Amino acid sequence: MKVIIVGGVAGGASCAARLRRLDEKAEILMVERGPYVSYANCGLPYYVGGVIEKESSLLVASEKLFRSHFNIDVRTNCEAIAISPKDKTVDLRNVTTGEIVTKSYDKLVLSPGAPSVHPDLPGIDLPGIFHVRTVPDVRAMREWIEKGTAFLAGMFCYSGIQMAKPVRRAVVVGGGFIGLEMAENLVHIGFNVTLIQKPPQLLGPIDEEMARLVEGHVARHGVQLELNDGAAGFRQLEGGAIEVQTSSGKTHAADIVILAIGVRPDTALAKMAGLEVGARGGIRVDEHMRTSDPDIFAVGDAIEVKDFVTGQWSLVALAGPANRQGRMAADVIAGRNSRYRGTQGTSIIGLFGGAAAWTGVSERTLKGLGDTDYEKIYLYPNSHAGYYPGAKMMGFKVLFRKSDGRLLGAQAIGEDGPGVDKRISALAMALQMGATIYDLEEAELCYAPQFGSAKDPVNFAGMVAANILHGDMPVTHWESADGAFLLDVREPVELVIESMPGAVNIPMGQLRDRLGELPRDREIHVICRSAQRAYYATRILLQNGFNARNISGGMLSRAMRSLGGGASASTPK
């Protein structure tokens, strides 16, 4: 059996290695248009920032390794330029010499990836403007940072004591994974960084109020955010610097510009071969990773996949799914009945020591689908036992079905990155197994005070959600609080810091003795700082005949809604 794999890196390389382990006799040819067959593209920003010191550390597997360990014919700097499904052939061009050869296949795997979006803007090809996709990209970036302009080169030519070091400026266009990771790493190496983001929030997969926490966190670490404003053009300034012009008419001077606007599936070969391309712009595949041609498979960033929760087609450019898809394609080619379950979009990003992570669907996605069978909760547990030094508060949003309690999605943000990672990873596994919030209540997780709490945040989320579905804690949210009777059960000293206009304050410890001050003909919305005392108060009120609801997340969730945003969010608001 002859198998040709077009594209290496995550999907193609994992497919090639898995297929060899399953079939020692198969003739496997893997071609990669770039100079490296398998590299850690997720590590590229950290090489720019010096966290990863050696370029060689980014190279996961070489041509030599694939040949010696797996007996795979690997050809780098080799581009597939045409496919003939009828003849079952692929035309391959050596990008160095231009030579073209034709190879036949029994099975073909496409893993072309998704190139960076490169909009047709004035000046976008000026020197000093970079994408972050390949090892050569970041090598060129590091060279530019050292000597790309007279100013940058001069930064390292001073002798003696440098009393006032000039400021280096960077503009990052795009507020997704790559944009934020590049912003962080440029800050680490001494740049003043401005991040321009056309949408009104960072990190599109999470909900707006959770993104506000991320925006406040990166702003506190020196990144100037310009939200609701896109790049409109670029102009070279004297000395080689670049002026970034935005849609709102603002200009930002930069010594280096990073374009991280997103990626677009590479479907050129698929279209040439007459393969089905979906409405989202990716190659359409079935659960076995087969395209519309049964002998052609596709994996990785170029394909459309089914969302695990909604069943809708989606584009998910993540290394984990790409690796698993490559492995499954190899299984099917080797005769196994492997099936891809779909993608949850489970992700995490580290930022200045903290992290934001998520899995499953967002509330925005559910609303876009017209899905109303869900409830949400906000909670703010510590990353580990509060009495043990170093505990950090984490912000969680958890979504679940009102009808049956099935977990739909979760988002978490906190300064303790491993604490965030641990909880979202647990929730991601629960979601994939079809768990309900009742399962979260009963989950048995590791506990020692330096790692967690006896009532882990995962358990805590399940307990809070179960209280809602059992009717023990009717819940509401700030967007529904207008006109309601607000009862604030915090202590008076807390109100000095923040208060709600029009709220009646009865401290929790006095509530039982002051029930006569509350109306029985109105719904009472109860608040405290995080909703825990409000839960206690809600239970008292319900059992005394009042109509009461707890505002989920309390004043902390209200603060999230009012942070950041707007055309400029250089500081949290």
Image (cartoon, rainbow, N blue to C red):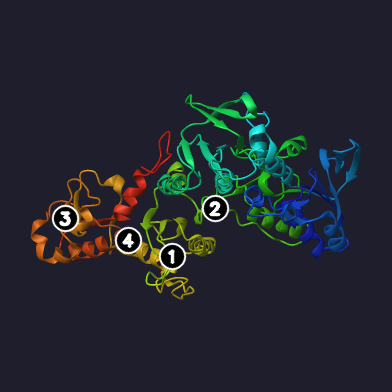
Q: Label 3's element?
A: strand
Q: Label 2's element?
A: strand
Q: Residue furthest bottom?
A: 448
Q: Is residue 337 above or below residue 555?
A: below
Residue at 51 percent across and 50 percent down: it is: 310
Amino acid found under the numbered disc labelled 1: Ser
- Cβ–Cβ under 8 Å for marks 4 and 3: no
Which mark is first along the chain, 3 or 2?
2
Which mark is first along the chain, 3 or 1?
1
Mark closer to the observer (1, 4): 1
Q: Is residue 305 above or below residue 400?
A: above
Identify residue for label 2.
349
Identify residue for label 4.
468
Q: Can residue 261 be seen in the rendering of this structure?
A: yes
Q: Can residue 85 be seen in the rendering of this structure?
A: no
Residue 96 is situated, as x and y percent measured from the top left of the image, at 87, 38
Figure label count: 4
Mark closer to the observer (2, 4): 2
Which mark is first along the chain, 2 or 1?
2
Q: Label 1's element?
A: loop
Residue 50 is situated, as x and y percent measured from the top left of the image, at 64, 51
Amino acid found under the numbered disc labelled 2: Ile
Identify residue for label 1.
383
379 vs 49, left or right, is: left
Question: Gap in Å between the C-alphas at discs 1 and 4?
Answer: 24 Å
